[in-house]
Image (spheres, grey):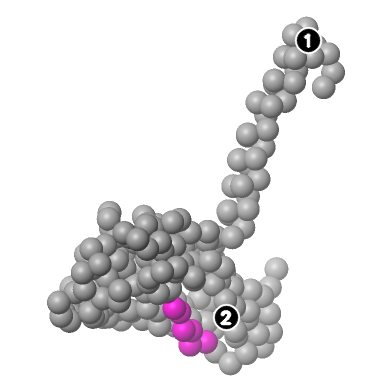
Amino acid sequence: MRRAPGATRVPVETLPATVRIVRRPGTGVARSSGGPYLMTMRRFAILPAMLLALVGAAFASAHPARALESRPAVSAQAEVRLVAEQDAVAPGTELRVGLLLRLAPGWHTYWKNPGDAGAPAEITFSLPDGATAGPIAWPLPRRLPQGPLVAFGYTGEVLLPLTISLPAGLAEGRSLPIEAAASWLVCAEICIPEEANFRLELPVVAAG
């Protein structure tokens, strides 16, 4: 990999006020009229649809819906934002959120165990007292061959989901601020570290 020759900064005026991106040097059967055989083939034909439904349910369970999104951090390589599965919360419940990365063609980012090269995304939350954020539930990566090296990561769009546990003492009628500082590495011919601050604000409503 070539390393980026020097540090450059995305012009601040092109970004939302709460977002900052910094580029730094790279790092590197029953019988039927068709007979038993036909019935068996029909059963096999049903299996793929059943498997797809199961996979789809599992995927939906692992990835929060995007009911609420932060302002994006935008660069030539990626568009990144913090998303939540709902637009309101109740005391003593859980909220699933995620870092959503949309990568430009030719660019990739890394899994939690990046392999021979790279570094994973990191998220640090600032939450009200009593609220805690769990670890990222990393999606399965793809192999990213890089000459003699092999890394593991993602291309296109990837969502890095996690769960925030909320305290029972949240006051109804008020807002819950969720702030996150995130960093991630995007690579093609060169690697560029990027970082941004994100914020979500959700109203607190009665449970049920």
Can residue 29 be seen in this snapshot? yes
Q: Nearer the viewer, residue 67 or 64?
A: 64
Amino acid type, callout 2 = Ala
Q: Secondary structure at mark 1?
A: helix
Q: Would you name the residue on which mark 2 appears?
A: 133
Q: Would you name the residue on which mark 1 appears?
A: 35
Amino acid type, callout 1 = Gly
The location of residue 89, given as percent across then percent down, is: 59, 74
Q: Quadrant of residue 108?
A: bottom left
- Label 2 CA crowd tier, 10 Å (few <14, some 14–19, many 20+): some
Q: Quadrant of residue 51?
A: top right
Name which residue lies at 70% across and 21% down. 42
On the rendered image, what quadrant is the N terminus found in? bottom left
Furthest-top residue in this view = 33
Residue 124 lies in magenta, yes or no?
yes
User: What is the number of the mark on residue 206?
Assistant: none
Q: Horizontally, is 119 left or right of 178 in the view?
A: left
Q: CA distance from mark 1 to mark 2?
A: 57 Å
Name which residue lies at 30% across and 74% down. 28
Name which residue lies at 36% across and 81% down. 197
Please tell me whether residue 128 is drawn above or below residue 8 in the rendered image: below
Which mark sits nearer the N-terminus, 1 or 2? Answer: 1
Please tell me whether residue 135 is drawn above or below residue 146 in the rendered image: below
Residue 19 lies in magenta, yes or no?
no
